[in-house]
Image (tube, rainbow, N blue to C red):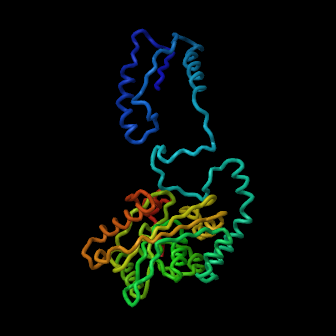
């Protein structure tokens, strides 16, 4: 509904140009996902407000009076009501900061009372991953509130000796490779872009930094695959929302055997990732959630005739793997990169200083 108000209307005044301009803009607005009432086919125009010519201090009185009456017809905002994702003006893909809940007064009070217990739980949970063996880590983590579920894991064919398997994972937090290792019940090294020295020291698996030099990184990954399995997150950075970033095709040009792995994370209080904050705190923050949850799903091997020796371009294989993971998670695939994220939040391209 469009209301037309004017306190200085003249007998020859016409609303037609404004009406036509709004009608022309309405269709593109709706097409781009603008908020509107789906039950209405178009705009409705209301011109019949009583208007009086006014001068001096009385100018605008009728307009203000009508606006006051109209404002009382608007529904009040409920702070407990979340705006549905499909009603967002634009897709929300990147955001920073650790807070993961709506900060109502009661929720904020509970949040400030929780840190002592949260930090204690986080230290215990991280210690379990470092000290406890893989066989009992699931049970020990569950005792302290970590929910972990895995599916699709298949036994390897006996007697077949091949190069290592490359596990291609979605990237939600810094502990993704550790959770994969726990599911496989064996240590699997991982390639990383930016990891704090503290995280590298306490990590229960080997971490190898990517240099952003394509030739050197390819040699490193090939060498690691000759000696065993390897984990890689081709997005290059984490994404909290239901979107997958662009997959770097380098992994698809090096492996003979690869398997896409879905990693899905649920938190209730704090996001375990940051761009502008202290990255060494990310695992601590993630495990400080009351009940952090991880779900892993192994999607089966990529057809062996595709990668490396199969003749298919690396970009084609990488795009196929991205779509496969996106379909399993019901996420939308994008062409956004690590550089896009870091330019938005940190003002740099995400290259780690040597």
268 above or below 10?
below
- Asked whether, in this view, residue 310 is left or right of residue 43, the answer is left
- Residue 353 appears at what percent x and percent y? 48, 72
Between 347 and 275, the residue placed more toward the observer is 275
- Residue 209 appears at what percent x and percent y? 47, 77
Between 8 and 310, the residue placed more toward the observer is 310
12 above or below 329?
above
Between 171 and 133, the residue placed more toward the observer is 133
- Residue 207 appears at what percent x and percent y? 50, 79
Q: Quadrant of residue 265?
A: bottom right
Between 296 and 288, the residue placed more toward the observer is 296
212 above or below 346?
below
Identified at 43% across, 61% down, the residue is: 244
- Residue 90 appears at what percent x and percent y? 45, 46
Identified at 39% across, 16% down, the residue is: 14
Identified at 44% across, 58% down, the residue is: 330
């Amino acid at each position: 509904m469009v209301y037309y108000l004017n306190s200085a209307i003249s007998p020859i005044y016409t609303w037609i140009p404004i009406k036509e301009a709004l009608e022309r803009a309405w269709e593109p607005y709706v097409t781009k996902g603008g908020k509107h009432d789906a039950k209405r086919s178009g705009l409705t125009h209301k011109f019949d407000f009583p208007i009086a010519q006014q001068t001096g201090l009385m100018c605008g009185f009728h307009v203000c009076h009508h606006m006051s009456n109209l404002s009382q017809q608007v529904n009040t905002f409920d702070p407990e009501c979340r705006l549905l994702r499909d009603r967002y003006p634009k897709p929300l893909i990147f955001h920073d900061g650790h807070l993961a809940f709506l900060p109502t007064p009661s929720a904020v009070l509970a949040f400030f009372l929780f840190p002592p217990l949260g930090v204690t739980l986080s230290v215990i949970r991280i210690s379990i991953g470092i000290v406890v063996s893989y066989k009992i880590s699931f049970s020990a983590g569950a005792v302290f509130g970590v929910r972990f579920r895995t599916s699709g894991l298949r036994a390897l064919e006996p007697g077949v000796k091949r190069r290592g398997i490359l596990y291609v994972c979605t990237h939600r937090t810094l502990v993704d490779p550790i959770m994969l290792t726990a599911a496989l019940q064996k240590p699997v090294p991982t390639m990383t872009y930016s990891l704090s020295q503290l995280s590298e020291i306490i990590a229960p698996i080997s971490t190898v930094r990517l240099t952003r030099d394509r030739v050197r990184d390819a040699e490193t990954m090939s060498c690691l695959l000759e000696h065993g399995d390897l984990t890689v997150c081709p997005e290059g950075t984490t994404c909290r929302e239901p979107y997958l970033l662009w997959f770097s095709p380098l992994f698809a040009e090096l492996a003979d055997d690869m398997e896409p792995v879905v990693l899905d994370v649920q938190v209730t209080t704090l996001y375990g990732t940051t761009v502008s904050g202290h990255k060494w705190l990310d695992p601590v923050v993630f495990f400080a959630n009351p009940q952090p949850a991880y779900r892993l799903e192994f999607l089966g091997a990529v057809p062996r005739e595709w990668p490396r020796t199969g003749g298919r371009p690396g970009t084609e294989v990488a795009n196929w793997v991205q779509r496969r993971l996106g379909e399993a998670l019901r996420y939308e695939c994008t062409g956004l990169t690590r550089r896009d994220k870091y330019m938005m939040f940190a003002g740099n391209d995400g290259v780690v200083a040597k």
